[in-house]
Image: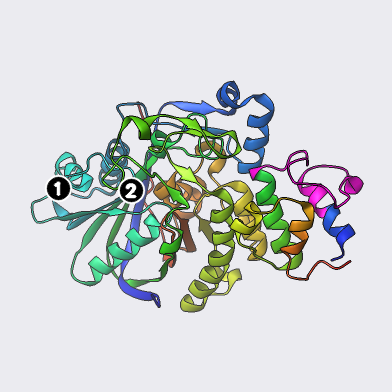
């Protein structure tokens, strides 16, 4: 999966328009990034990338870029 | 543990009892707002929950379920050799709640009775214990599993309040030479703090501090005597453990997925169940869901789902069921068993 697709997946989780995430956002400024969105994100990583990342590392993430970095190289430029 | 296969016992009947009081999404809107309540309900798949009144305990619900089941099966209470009470919400620190139920059900003095402190995985553990007891000489075992978890959810905690409902169940297990059941059980104690009521007993006794509700993560309001649930941790734990658990129980039983009539999973929440079912490639019609009307009822959720969703299929014929419970502990268990025809009384509503 490339970054553009990854951002679109996050937008889907947040019920936003596909192009609305640019990648330079902090999670705090993302509309709808709450505990339920985190579950949606975990489910997306599992079904799209076959990844189960530790919940604590998601909780420690501050930016969309941090989320990319959780994906163990499975999200490409 | 490597799992076990136990011959010589079979489930003969199940009953479920719920409190009369029902809370709806609309009543949650008063606390969390209309929009949030609707969004939460959509995600967790819970529209209504039966909640215990202040003077209703788990034992009251299990007592109602057990009485109805004994009557339905025409079992003489004196013929019950063992009573197991599985719960996270006991009536007292001591004695065992099972002993109080022993009195109320009029069981005999030769009946072995004990409590098991487990929740989401508790029914499967209880079934495994009941089958084990029969294999060592008991003839009839009553397994009572239930919880009133709503009593320990913070009124302002959106991670727990809209999700948990209360219920008590009774399951009758009897010696049966022709029957066999398979079990897989496990524990990850390192996750014990992810689903916990942190205070109120001996580790952190009740005090003014522990009983005051304050604002916590994501604006949730609760006290340290209320249930804390780290939903993200529980979800990743379930993704990690449940698919391999179900694969192991299928392997142990020798059944293909297509040969199983229903996969009855602990009713954690709809989002999680849908994802797990998809991940395990289970046909959705084989994964019954009772959440919409009852919420997550902890140790009662698997037997409640059997009585409410599979009654018609189990009353007159044999069915192959795979059961899987997972959660608080962290603890998990799966069972594969062929059961039926079963005695299943109507849902009991306790005023």
Q: Is A43 above or below relative to B178?
A: above
Q: Position of residue B334 (x, y in %)?
A: 45, 65
Q: Which residue is mark 2?
A: B87
The residue segment tinted magenta is A9-35
Q: Is B281 above or below relative to B167?
A: below
| Mark 1 closeness class: few <14, some 14–19, many ≥20 residues within 10 Å | many
Residue lying at the far right in this picture: please name it.
A19
Q: Position of residue A28 (x, y in %)?
A: 73, 42
Q: Main SS of the magenta segment?
A: loop
Q: Is B30 above or below relative to B328?
A: above
Which numbered disc, 2 or 1, marks the residue that appears first in the sequence?
Answer: 2
Image quadrant occupied by the C terminus of chain B? top left
Q: Is residue B15 left or right of residue B141?
A: right
| Mark 2 closeness class: few <14, some 14–19, many ≥20 residues within 10 Å | many
Residue shown at the point (35%, 54%) measured from the top left:
B118
**In the image shown, does A16 or B341 lie closer to the viewer?**
A16
Residue B155 sits inside the magenta stretch: no
Q: Position of residue B319 (x, y in %)?
A: 48, 62
The answer to whether one can see residue B345 in this image is: no
Q: Is residue B92 left or right of residue A70?
A: left
């Amino acid at each position: 999966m490339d970054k553009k697709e990854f951002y679109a997946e996050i937008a889907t989780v947040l019920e936003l328009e596909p192009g609305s995430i640019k990648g330079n956002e902090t999670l705090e400024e993302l509309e709808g990034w709450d505990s339920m969105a985190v579950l949606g994100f975990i489910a997306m990583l599992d079904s799209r990338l076959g990844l189960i990342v530790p919940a604590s590392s998601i909780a420690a993430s501050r930016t969309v870029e941090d989320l990319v970095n959780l994906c163990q190289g499975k999200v490409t430029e | 543990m490597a799992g076990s296969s136990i011959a010589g016992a079979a489930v003969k009947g199940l009953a479920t009892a719920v409190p009369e009081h029902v809370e709806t999404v609309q009543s949650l809107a008063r606390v969390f707002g209309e929009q949030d309540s609707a969004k939460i309900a959509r995600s967790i798949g819970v529209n209504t929950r039966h909640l215990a009144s202040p003077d209703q305990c788990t034992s009251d619900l299990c007592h109602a379920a057990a009485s109805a089941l004994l009557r339905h099966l025409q079992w003489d209470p004196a013929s019950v050799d063992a009573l197991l009470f599985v719960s996270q919400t006991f009536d007292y620190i001591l004695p065992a709640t099972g002993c109080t139920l022993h009195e109320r059900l009029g069981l005999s003095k030769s009946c072995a009775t004990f409590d098991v402190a487990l929740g989401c995985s508790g029914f499967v553990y209880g079934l495994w214990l009941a089958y084990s007891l029969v294999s060592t000489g008991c003839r009839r075992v009553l397994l009572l599993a239930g919880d009133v978890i709503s009593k320990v959810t913070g009124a302002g905690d959106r991670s727990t309040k809209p999700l948990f409902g209360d219920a008590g169940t009774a399951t009758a297990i009897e010696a049966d030479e022709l029957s066999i059941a398979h079990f897989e059980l496990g524990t990850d104690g390192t996750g014990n703090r992810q689903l916990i009521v942190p205070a109120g007993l001996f580790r952190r006794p009740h005090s003014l501090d522990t009983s005051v509700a304050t604002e916590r993560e994501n604006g949730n309001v609760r006290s340290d005597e209320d249930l804390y649930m780290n939903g993200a941790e529980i979800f990743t734990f379930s993704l990690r453990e449940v698919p391999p658990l179900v694969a192991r129980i299928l392997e142990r039983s020798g059944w293909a997925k297509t040969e199983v009539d229903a996969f009855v999973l602990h009713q954690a929440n709809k989002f999680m169940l849908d994802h797990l079912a998809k991940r395990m490639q289970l046909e959705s019609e084989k994964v019954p869901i009772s959440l919409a009307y009852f919420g997550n009822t902890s140790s009662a959720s698997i037997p409640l789902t059997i009585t409410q969703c599979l009654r018609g299929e189990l009353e007159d014929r044999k069915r192959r069921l795979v059961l899987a419970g997972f959660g608080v502990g962290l603890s998990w268990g799966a069972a594969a068993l062929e059961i039926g025809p079963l005695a299943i009384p109507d849902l009991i509503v306790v005023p």
